[in-house]
Structure formats: structure tokens, C-alpha cells
Amino acid sequence: MTIFVAVDNYSSSPVQYLRQQRLLLEMEYNCEKEEFRRQAEAAGLQRKVKRGDAWMPVSVGKSYYNSLNQLAVEVLRTQDKEIEHNFEFGRPVVFFETKDDSCQPPRGEGTDRQGKPSSSTRGARQGASFLFTGTVSYVDGDRMVVTVPDNAPITRLQTAENVGVQLFFDETTYRLMFEALDRVIGAKGNRLAYLRDLFASRQKAETFSFSPISFPWLNPTQEQAVNNVLRAKDVAIVHGPPGTGKTTTLVEAIYETLRRENQVLVCAQSNMAVDWISERLVDRGVNVLRIGNPVKVNDKMLSFTYERRFADHPDYPQLWSIRQAIRKLRQGDKRRRDEGYHQKLDRLKSRATELEIRINAQLFGEARVIASTLTGSANRLLMGQKFGTLFIDEAAQALEAACWIAIRRASRVILAGDHCQLPPTVKSVAALRGGLGVTLMERIVRQKPEAVTLLKTQYRMNEQIMRFSSDWFYGGMVEAAPQIKYRGILDLDNPMTWIDTAEVEGKEEFVGESFGRINRAEAQLTLDTLEKYFTKIGKQRILDERIDVGVISPYRAQVQLLRRMIRKKEFFKPFRGLVSVNTVDGFQGQERDIIVISLVRANADGQIGFLSDLRRMNVAITRARMKLIILGDVQTMTRHPFYRKLYEYVSSMS
């Protein structure tokens, strides 16, 4: 196998560079597909359920055609409801049936054109078999709606006794990224080719010249960022460290751009990020059309989705009636399909198409912002659409290929994010070494520092919590706003504490391939520490002031262990709505009054695994507003210079 070496100079042509990116993406695709195949054959179903990758058993509810004329089926989770799952809009799933209680997973990963598992994958292991695939339309707690092929055997699904649903390998996202890279590589003499060549060179991005616009409600660097976005002809970057108001700045930049342009495209890597910025824009009175369904299903969020707007259109009842007539006609006696049948069917289809075009034209004509994930920007609804400006939030978490899916539709690009926080997930070690994890935003930051505006005032953390992150990751340039500089919960309390888990002889345990590690003694110490701190604050004060807590561990297995322990412990029952436990990735973009971090690693060799990716730790320690408690084995962790410096910094406060 060829191993590519990531380089920081782009002496090769932009086309050669992107061809290398494509090869690296192929390596990642093959790696992820092989891992899925291996896990599908080896991992027990109960583990998939515990990981949140499967629901078993499920109750299958009603089936119906949605407003987009897709066959949809309602699925309800009946057990293990306390487990946080990974199902969300757009993710492919597969339904399966088990013949016994073996809890073994179904085998295989391929599908044919009808959405059924391919012949090579229909074999069942100990009586488990795939039925058919679908795509998540939306999820609301333990209820999920899945769109399925028209010929899916819904009746069998509704009558079978042991039916489950699990996440499936996502071929679509990779296909879209490959298609985007191929389009960019082949671009000649157009705007896409210009942006491709510009992003891969040290040529300065062009700007307009005008006097700065004043925004008194923004701080100086936020105001500068908005002005730089408005001046950019090609590209601008809003670099937002934790708590610096990146979303506020981006919303203002979008709002001001809409004074100059009729419509913009706003994308992000995750559905949650798209929801967040869409909601903020709606609060500003902007007409947003959300392509895809939101993660948080409520009336406010649903009200600006394409599907809800389509169904609420005055012409929709007429369209629904025509579609119903078409389905009845097709279900009629096939022996009576004469020339009159075909003429009637053609007339109905023509009228349905005419109504669809009219509704779409009105919805897209009225919308000022089209919002979607990066892969969602390839939706057929946007076919042929072009935008003057594309805004990409969370740009530092997206693979470069994913960004190009949306960039194909735009003349200029505004990227927002922080490449010192969570990177994109890359599973192939070879692809990572080759540079697949280097994002487009990171590349442009290196190549074009003049296009970058760093937001420098943060409004989240006590100054002492913020200082370490600012010094290590941002050259000491981030400062705390005066009003939150000394924020705290208890008088004379240290904002940061490191508790050495060697005191309880905590040792890490390996709990299964790709599932991670746990540290039982450290988990118990985590609960004991939190209980002591709660007792110091006082139960009534916590409830009255709604003091919230985030318990973070980099390892999913430790997260699951901590959740179980907190649920069982009587002391925490009154605070159930105030304490959340999740991975670092799960807390991205969030904040809590108190953050407790369980590092897990404790071994004689000083091995810390992926904790050596310091961007992950930057996210973890910057979630806290007023109090940060770190639990970790000092001897193991401080062999790494970052953690040694962090431990020394925290120790200096006591």
C-alpha cells in the first residue's frame, strides 16, 4: 500500500493535490467499509444497542406517504430507552428480524437497487436476517420515522415479532464526496476552477474596499470579522475560539450579506449546527428554508423545514389528491391497462409535476437563507441553484471533500470554526498520515492568514479556566470579558481542580474492540467528588439556580458506565435534569456551570492513546463556565508535555 506523507507546501498543482486527496478518501472509505463489515459479523447485537447504534426490539407503527411522496414508516423503541442513540436525519439504516434470542447481529452490508440486502449478504447468522434498508427522516426521542423503498414489505415488518433497526454503512456520503472532488478536479475556466487554484496557492484573496461599518452591539474583533466577510471577494475565515461568540458573529455577517444579496446558502457539517444557526437566523426575522429535518423536533424548528412548508402550501391538498389517484391507478388490475390507462396516468403525472414546480418555485423564491448540511447541499431540490455566498459553519470539523460538495454552488466562501478544537473523524491511520485530516479551513488559514479574523473576547469562562487554553492554543490572544472574568460558584474556591486517581488505585480496563476503555475506581471517585461539591453548594441552591453539570469522558465506555452509576445513585435523583454525561464530541458547542472530566487512562507505560490529540482536550476544558474538575492518573498523564503543563498550571492555584 502506498503511504502518502502530508506536506505543508503545495508545490504540486492544485489538481494533483486534490487527486491525492481523492486517493486518501478511497483509503478511508475502504477502511470504514471493512470495519463495518467486521463489526457486523463479530459484534453482538447487545453491544450495538448499548452503543446506541441499534434499537432492538422495536414496535412498527403506521406507514404513509409523506409530503415528498416517499413511503415512510414509524418506528418506536420499546426497550433500553435510557441509552443515548446515534440515529439522526439522513443516516442510512437497515431493518432486521431475529428468529431466536441469540442476540447475534445480521450479517453483510450490501444492498441491491430495490433497497434489499444483496444476494451475498442475505445469509443470516443464527437466525438473524436483514429485511430492507431505509433512511432516517427524523427522530424525536424514542420515535423515529424512516423512509423506505416503495416496494418494501411493510406488512411483514409490522407483523414480525423480533424486529430491530440498526445503522447501516453510509455509501451516499462517500459517493457525494467523490463526485464533488471529480467535478473540482475537472473544472476549467470557471469560478470553481478559480477557487480551487486560489485555495491551493499563496496568492492573496481579493477584497473590496470600503469604510468599515459600525456594529455597536458587537465587540471590536467581532465587528472586524463582519466587515472582513463583507469585503471578501473570494474567501474569508472567522476563527472562533471557545466562548468568543462565533455564531453571533456569523449570524450578523449573514444578516448584513442579505442586505446586498437576495439569497445565501448556509451549511455545516452536522445537523445540530445547521439547526442552531437556523434558529438564530429565524429569531432575527430571516426567512430560512431548512433542507432536511432538524435534530430537535419541535414546532419552532419544524416550521422552517422544507417538508413542513411544502405540506402547508395551499396547493398541497390538490397535489396530494393527484398522487393518491396515481397510486390507486397503479394498484388497479394490470390486465386492464390499455391506451386510456396510460393517457390518464400521463395527465395525472404531468399535473403533479406542474404543481410541485409551482410550490417549489414559491418556497425557494421567498426564502432568504437555504440551510442544510454539507452533504444535504447535494439534494435534488437544489439542482441547478447557484449562490453568491456560501457560509460554512463548523468548517474545521469537515473533510475538505465534503466542503467542495457545497462550494460547487457558490461564487465566494465564508468559513467559520476553530481548527484548534475537534477535527474531522478519520479512521484510516494511513489516510490520516497522508493528510486527509487537514481541513480546507486549516489549509486556507496556513496559506492566507490575511483572510482570517481571530475573535479575541470570550464570554463563557472564568479567566483562570480560560487562560491555559488561550496561552497554549491561541498565543495568549484570547481574553475574558470583564463581566465574567471572576465568575464562580463558591467564595474562595479554585476554579480548576485536578484529582489524582492514583489515590484510589484506579486502573484502566479494555472493554472490547472499538468500544474503548473504562476505569471503575475513577468512575466511582468522579461520583464521590461531584457529590461532595454538590453538598458544599447546597441542594436547594443547585435546584433554585439551576446550576448545571457536564460529566465528560473521552471514552464512550466510561460515559456509559458513569450514566448507569449516576442513574442508580439516590443522591443524584433530584438533579437528574441538571447533570448530563457525554463524550467530548457530544459536548462540542455546549457549556455548563460545572464540568467534570474523567480521563480514564492509568497504566505503567504512560500510554494515553487518542488523548494525545490535544484539540479534543481543548474542547473538554473549555466547556466550563465557573468550575472545572479533572480526574486523572498524574503519573500516566504528565508524561505528555501538554498534560504536565496543565497539571502544573492547576496545581499553582492551590
Image (spheres, helix red, strand yellow):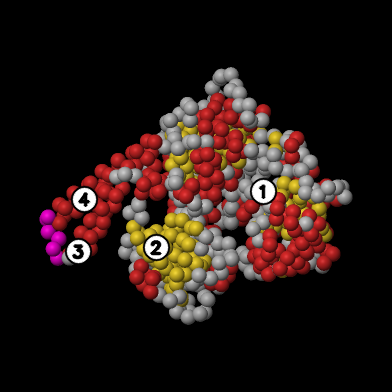
In the displayed structure image, the side of residue 279 where residue 518 appears, left or right = right
Q: Nearer the viewer, residue 477 or 322?
A: 322
Element assignment for label 4 = helix
Q: Earlier in the sequence, mark 2 or mark 1?
A: 2
Residue denoted by label 4 = 348
Amino acid identity at mark 3 = Gly
The span from disc 3 to disc 4 (Cα, nearest Å) is 15 Å
Question: Any mark on residue 332, and which?
Answer: 3
Indicate whether 344 appears above or below 134: above
Dot 3 or dot 4, earlier in sequence:
3
The crowding category of the residue bearing disc 4, from other C-alpha atoms within 10 Å (few below 14, some 14 to 19, many at least 20), is some
Give the SS element for disc 3. Answer: loop
Q: Is residue 38 visible?
A: no
Give the residue displayed 51% in from the left and 42% down from the top.
Answer: 278
Quadrant of the frame with the N terminus: bottom right
**Which tag is nearer the camera, tag 3 or tag 1?**
1
C-alpha separation, residue under disc 3 versus residue under disc 1: 58 Å
* Stretch in magenta: 335-340
Label 1, on which residue?
Answer: 591
Q: Which residue is mark 2?
A: 73
Mark 2 residue type: Val
